[in-house]
Image (cartoon, rainbow, N blue to C red):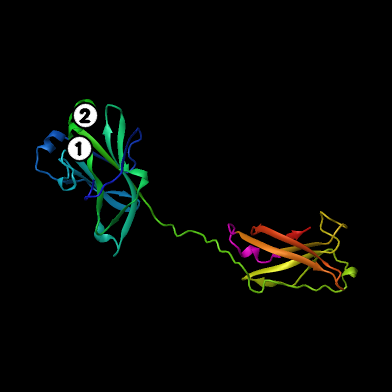
């Protein structure tokens, strides 16, 4: 419990020492016999901010810490921070167990983030370690009347990067008609339509009268191509659903091809080969 609120806390052992700060307390027995209610460590840097460890040797009695060592992380040099500041962190506090050669790691369960701001400049665990457990040498937390605490602080910063998935149900002016005169007399291998725009993207049709390389002299090949694909970011994607129709004159019918395809920036064309 901290500040009257229940908290889910995780405790575990690990061999790796804390990556940001170690705080050695010597002559623990002498410290316990003083009137020191709270001791603040020196400053250390993590995630671009300054921090301290705050230890209550006899427990933070205001937060149900009686009979325990209470250990907190506190943000330092707050006067240098901008107005309305807040810092979101995931932090762990440690105490070294000499018997097991491991660090007891205490943290909020499920990786919960803690928000520091002008109203909350410290956070931690009022019941960090029982004094009965600490003072019993067989438990391994005291070695020659000294104890080692530690901290890891990982600041969550928004990088400013992200993306948006936008879907268009019915594009405006989504129909383009390309009239080709004297189709049977075409001699060129490939023809390109005029460029047309649909929803701010530029497109064109590509026609192979005698078929593309895959269907040479077997069928007419018609493709839709994204013209300005080189202007898209390398990681951009465009999903296009479209229909290609070839209509004969004189009400002789038409051929229709329905396509749903993800267009990558460098893709030249989609359609019916």
Q: Is residue 268 visible?
A: no
Q: The magenta stretch spans which residues?
A: 225-236
Q: Which residue is mark 1?
A: 25
Q: Which residue is mark 2?
A: 143
Instruction: Write the residue at 20% across / 43% down.
Output: 55
State which quarter of the image contains the C terminus.
bottom right
- Label 2 crowding class (10 Å Cα cut-off): few <14, some 14-19, many 20+? some
Residue at the extreme top: 138
Task: Say which of 178 and 52 sits in front.
Answer: 178
- Secondary structure of the residue carrying tag 1 is strand
Q: Is residue 241 visible?
A: yes
* Quadrant assignment, res 106: top left
242 displayed left or right of 189: left
Report if residue 132 lies within the magenta region.
Answer: no
Task: Say which of 233 and 193 sits in front.
Answer: 193
Report if residue 233 lies within the magenta region.
Answer: yes
Task: Say which of 218 and 78 sits in front.
Answer: 218
- Label 1 crowding class (10 Å Cα cut-off): few <14, some 14-19, many 20+? few
Instruction: Write the residue at 75% across / 67% down.
Output: 205
Counting from the top left corner in percent of width and height, residue 195 is at 71, 72
* Quadrant assignment, res 58: top left
Q: Does 44 sit above or below residue 168?
A: above
* Quadrant assignment, res 188: bottom right
């Amino acid at each position: 419990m901290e500040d009257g609120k229940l908290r889910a806390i995780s405790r575990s052992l690990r061999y790796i020492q804390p990556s940001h700060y170690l705080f050695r307390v010597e002559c623990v027995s002498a410290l316990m016999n003083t009137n020191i209610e709270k001791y603040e460590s020196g400053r250390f840097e993590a995630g671009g901010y300054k921090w301290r460890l705050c230890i209550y040797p006899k427990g933070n009695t205001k937060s149900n810490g009686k009979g325990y060592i209470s250990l907190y992380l506190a943000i330092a040099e707050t006067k240098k921070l901008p107005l309305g500041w807040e810092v979101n962190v995931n932090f762990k506090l440690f105490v070294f167990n000499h018997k097991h050669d491991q660090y007891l790691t205490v943290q909020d369960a499920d990786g919960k983030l803690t928000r520091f701001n002008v109203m909350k400049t410290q956070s931690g665990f009022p019941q960090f370690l029982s004094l009965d457990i600490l003072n019993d040498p067989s438990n391994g937390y005291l070695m020659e009347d000294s104890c080692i605490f530690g901290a890891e602080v990982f600041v969550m910063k928004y990088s400013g990067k992200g993306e948006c998935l936008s879907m268009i149900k019915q594009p405006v002016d989504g129909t383009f008609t390309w009239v080709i005169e004297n189709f049977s007399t075409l001699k060129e291998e490939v023809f390109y339509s005029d460029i047309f725009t649909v929803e701010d993207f530029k497109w064109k049709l590509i026609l192979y009268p005698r078929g593309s390389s895959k269907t040479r002299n077997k069928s007419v090949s018609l493709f839709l191509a994204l013209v300005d694909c080189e202007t898209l970011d390398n990681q951009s994607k465009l999903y296009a659903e479209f229909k290609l129709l070839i209509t004969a004159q004189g009400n002789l019918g038409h051929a229709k091809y329905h396509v749903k395809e993800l267009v990558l920036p460098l893709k030249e064309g989609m359609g019916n080969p």
